[in-house]
Image: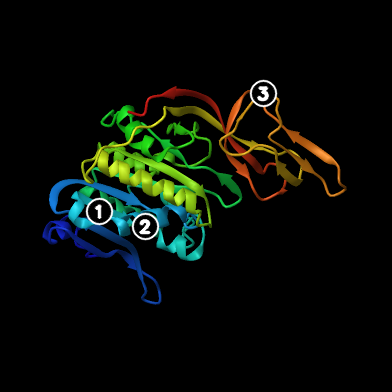
Amino acid sequence: MGTTPLREILAAAAPASRVEGRFLAGTMASGAEIAIPWVAIKGSREGRCLWINGQVHGPEINGVLAALDFVNRVRPSDLSGSIVVSATANPLALDARTKTTPQDEGDLDQSFPGDAGGLPTERLAHTLFEQARGCADLLVNLHTMGHMFDSRPYAVYKLHPNGKVDEQALLAMIAPFRPGVACRMRVEQGLGELPGNIAGALDYQMLALGIPAFMIELGSGSRAEAPYIAQGIAGFEDVARRMGILPGDPGRYARLKRVARRAHVTVSHGGLFRAAKFPGETVRAADPLGSTMDLHGKVVESLALREECIVIGMRRDPVVHSGDRAAFVALEWDEVAGE
Ligand SMILES: [Zn+2]
């Protein structure tokens, strides 16, 4: 669509400057642009590039706000290198407040590296990917849980079999976000917690190129949660220090809880579900996560697991039908150094 590569725009920009624009991915019937807005800060000295992608799913807002607040508070003259924020990678889903793209029901985070001649979602993926791969030395891909769940910030990362980016390099950049857990997600078909093309995630396709990338799940959807936005900003600042982009010594962090297996816990009976545990809690085997009452006032289900778990996400919306997710939990974990 004739968008100038951002790498060229940054090269031509004055030192210690802020530039912004839109990556064109197409047009609507009305003629409105389908475009990905971006902001970039070029430092006063050469250096590496931190790329922050605020969202790929329309209702996930905390990451967008954290990325923009961060870039707004950075002083260009302090930087060695650059910071790029693509606030939304799927403007069609943001506008419609939907997880997927309304035009083709595509999930953008299962569509990378995209296709310049493909469906609307594939065109958006291609547009962002071509720009990011030309600039980024590290990419943070932000998400949140769905709006029906409460969750504290946590990380999700994958490992590419080509081994160009090792696990420790990722954990060192994940630790600054102080995630409740860091989930190592399997990519092989059929092993993910949810169906779909997990290998189509932006972070995984960046890893394939040897560019470190991971996901931060920053709270809950359809909300602006101030503490989690602040936690995201603190993470970006420290990652930028670790990359040598911002001056100052990187922080030190507690060990990470690395999760190898997680699961959705679903209800069998419909009714009104009330949580007994909250995100971040470790729950012993057989200790109830919550219970469901039917509309005659009887408790019809007490939800408990046979094994110990850590609560990652807990249902906030009490209305449940059989098969609905009540909790998202970690089932296997160990502790690892983040640096
Ligand atoms: Zn998401």
Disc 1 and disc 2 in contact, CB within 8 angstroms: no
Residue displayed at 41% across by 62% down? 91
Residue located at (53% from left, 57% from top) = 222
Classify mark 3: residues with Cα within 10 Å, few (<14), some (14-19) or many (20+): few
Task: Classify mark 2: helix, strand or loop.
Answer: helix
Q: Earlier in the sequence, mark 3 or mark 2?
A: 2
| Residue 237, x across and y down, in percent | 31, 46
Q: Earlier in the sequence, mark 1 or mark 2?
A: 2
Q: Position of residue 261 (x, y in %)?
A: 51, 28
| Quadrant of the rendering where the N terminus is positioned | bottom left
As measured in the structure, the alpha-carbon distance from the residue carrying label 1 to the one carrying label 3 is 47 Å
* Rendering coords of residue 287 (x, y %): 70, 28
The residues tagged by marks 1 and 2 sit, at their Cα atoms, a distance apart of: 22 Å
| Three-letter amino acid code of the residue under disc 1 | Gln
Numbered disc in front, either 1 or 2? 2
- Residue wearing tag 1: 131
Camera sees residue 24: yes
Q: Quadrant of the C terminus?
A: top left
Which residue position is annotated with label 3? 285
Q: Secondary structure at mark 3?
A: loop
